[in-house]
Amino acid sequence: MKKAVSVFLVLLMLAGVFSFTSSAAIIGENPDGTTIGLVEQGDGVEFNRGTIIENRGSVGTNYGVIKKNYGIVAFQRADSVIENHGGTIRNLFNGTVKNFGGKVETVFGGKVLLFGGSVDDNYGGTVIEYKKVTLDLIGASAEGLAEENGEQWIENGGEFVIIPDEGLVFENAPVISGGDIVDNGDGTYTVKNITGDITLEAKGKEPAAEPQPEAKKTQFELFAEVLYLLFTLLAHLLMSL
C-alpha cells in the first residue's frame, strides 16, 4: 500500500513539472545572430545576446537588442535601444530606453528618453523628459520638434519655431496652450517657456496686395497732352471770333 502511494506521489510530481514546463517556455540563452519574433506573456529568456522583436514575457539580462518591450527586462546592459510600451525595465546600465509607458525602476547608466511613464531612481544615467506637441497648422510648419511613435515632441525646456509656408503670412498670431509664444519680427514665431504638453493652432494666408504706384507718363505722352490742350484752346478762340 505504501509503495503504491509513493508511486502515486512521484507521478503527481512529474505531472506538476510537466504542467509547468508546458505552460511556460524558458529559454536559457538567445545567442548572437538569432532573432526571436515574440516572447509571449509567461515565457522568458534568461540571457539575450541576439534580437527580440517584441517582449511580452521576461528577459533576465539583455546584451543584445529588444525592439519593443511590454513585459519585464531585469538588467539592460547592451548599448542598444529599447522602446518600452507599458513594460518594466528594472535596472538600466547601458543603452537607451525610449519610454512611452510603464517605468524604468533604477538607472545606473545609459539614457532614458521619457515620453511617458516614469523613472523611479537615477544614480548616474541621463533622463530627458519630453512634452507632447499637438499642432493644427494650415499653410505653416514647425521646426525643431522630434518625431517618435507617430507623434511630435519637444524636449522639456526646449524651443521650436512656427514658420508660414512660402509666399504666405500668418492670418493671426498663433494660439497656444502649455507655453509662451514670441513674435520674431520676421513673420515667424518661437514657442518657449514650455510648462506642459503643447497645443498650437496657426493659419497662413496670402499677404494683402500692396498698392501699385501710378506709372509715370513718358515725354511723348506729356507732349501729346500739351498739343491737345493748345488745339482745344485755339478751336475755342476761332469759334468766338
Image (spheres, helix red, strand yellow):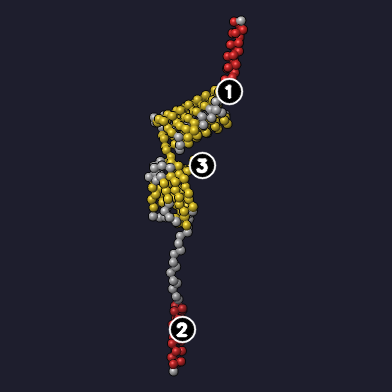
Q: Secondary structure at mark 1?
A: helix
Residue 122 in which image quadrant: top left
Closer to the chain start, of discs 1 and 3, is 1
Q: Residue at x 59, y 19 (%)?
A: 19
Q: CA distance from mark 1 to mark 3?
A: 36 Å
Residue 220 placement, left or right of 17: left
Q: Earlier in the sequence, mark 3 or mark 2?
A: 3
| Quadrant in which the C terminus appears | bottom left
Q: Nearer the viewer, residue 208 or 176?
A: 176
Q: Which disc is residue 228 wearing?
A: 2
**Which label belongs to residue 150?**
3
Q: Which marked residue is nearer to the observer: mark 3 or mark 2?
A: 3
Residue placed at 48% from the left, 50% from the top? 137
- Mark 3 surroundings within 10 Å by alpha-carbon count, few (fewer than 14), some (14 through 19), many (20 or more): few
Tell me residue 18's x, y (percent): 59, 18
The answer to whether marks 1 and 3 mark residues whose Cβ atoms lie closer than 8 Å is no
Q: Residue 226: name its quadrant.
A: bottom left
The secondary element bearing badge 2 is classed as helix
Question: Which image quarter holds the N terminus?
Answer: top right
Q: CA distance from mark 2 to mark 1?
A: 109 Å
x, y percent for residue 139? 49, 53
Name which residue type carries label 2.
Answer: Tyr
Name the residue tied to disc 1: 23
